[in-house]
Image (cartoon, rainbow, N blue to C red):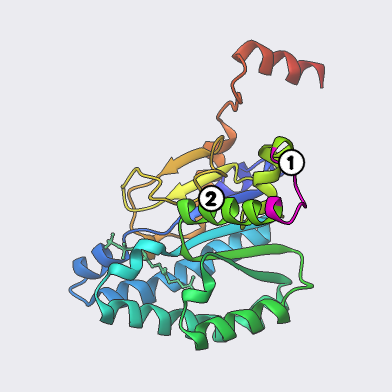
Amino acid sequence: MELKQQIDLERLPKHIAVIMDGNGRWAKEHGKQRIFGHQSGVNSVREVTEACAELGVKYLTLYAFSTENWNRPAMEVAGLMTLFAKTIMDEVKTFQKNNIRLNAIGDLKSLPKSNYDLLMKAMEDTKSNDRLILTLALSYSGRWDIANAMKNIAFAVQNNEIKPEDISQDTVNAYLSTAKMPDPELLIRTSGEERISNFLLWQLAYSEFYFMPKYWPDFKKDDLYEAIINYQHRERRFGKTSEQIVNKKEDE
Ligand code: FPP
């Protein structure tokens, strides 16, 4: 049976997050410059986006550029910014055709102004699409997100909008850049590295992690299907016992 058919569509993760890793190593293996790996990675972005939309996954969040990535050689950073701009410009029509909403999280103001403006325009143009919300994490890190939320909660306290004693986990959720999204049930990381690398630190508290050895440019739809099938075979306990979970399923 084809992999896609093995997926239980009733139990799809609503939100999948991906750490797209290994572009540089992929390029090296092919005897090319690193930027060639990033360019090839765009094809995998298309594969995973299309596959999520076709299956009915509602949220896909891709770690495209971390706060720490600013420390890479200037030429690579510039190449990546050009690639982001080009990809966004090229893909907006496809997003419209396929009812995909583009979203972005991170310290977006730190992006070159032309990238920022382009991103805002693409987000505005696709804002009423609702088949899939594709979020690019750009100049993003989990610690940045949490610190930014803390800062804005402090301002809200200062302005008497919130009382410190009323601050709860829901308050923190509401001030994170992912406020309107459910937490990812599944995190995929390519390239064999098994780290979270300052991605969605708060939001991944109960996510299932799926690490795979392939480099990102080699990622295809079947790899997504395999990750989802693997996820569907796991028991998510959220701190409860296995018996509690099994009994709950029997009651349903
Ligand atoms: C990590 O691989 C990848 C990145 C830092 C960039 C990811 C960007 C893309 C795939 C382009 C996608 C474009 C859009 C618009 C989303 P790495 O460079 O760390 O690889 P390495 O660990 O092998 O060096």
- Do tag 1 and tag 2 residues touch (Cβ < 8 Å)? no
Q: Main secondary structure of the magenta part?
A: loop
Q: Is residue 131 above or below residue 7?
A: below
Is residue 128 shown left or right of residue 194? right
Q: Position of residue 151 (x, y in %)?
A: 58, 55
Q: Is residue 238 magenta?
A: no
> Label 1: which residue?
10
**Residue that badge 2 annotates:** 146
> Of circles 1 and 2, which is in front?
2
Secondary structure under the numbered disc 1 in the rendered image: helix
In the image, residue 192 sits, relative to residue 247, either above or below, namely below
Mark 1: which amino acid? Glu
Residue 150's place in the image compared with 135, above or below, is above
Mark 1 or mark 2: which comes first in sequence?
1
| Extreme-right residue of the structure | 252
The quadrant of the picture showing ligand 1 is bottom left
Magenta region = 157-164
User: What percent of the width, then of the height, locates residue 2?
Assistant: 56, 48
Residue 2 visible in the current orientation: no
Residue drawn at (34%, 82%), measured in percent from left and top? 79
Q: Is residue 107 left or right of residue 8?
A: left
Q: CA distance from mark 1 to mark 2?
A: 33 Å
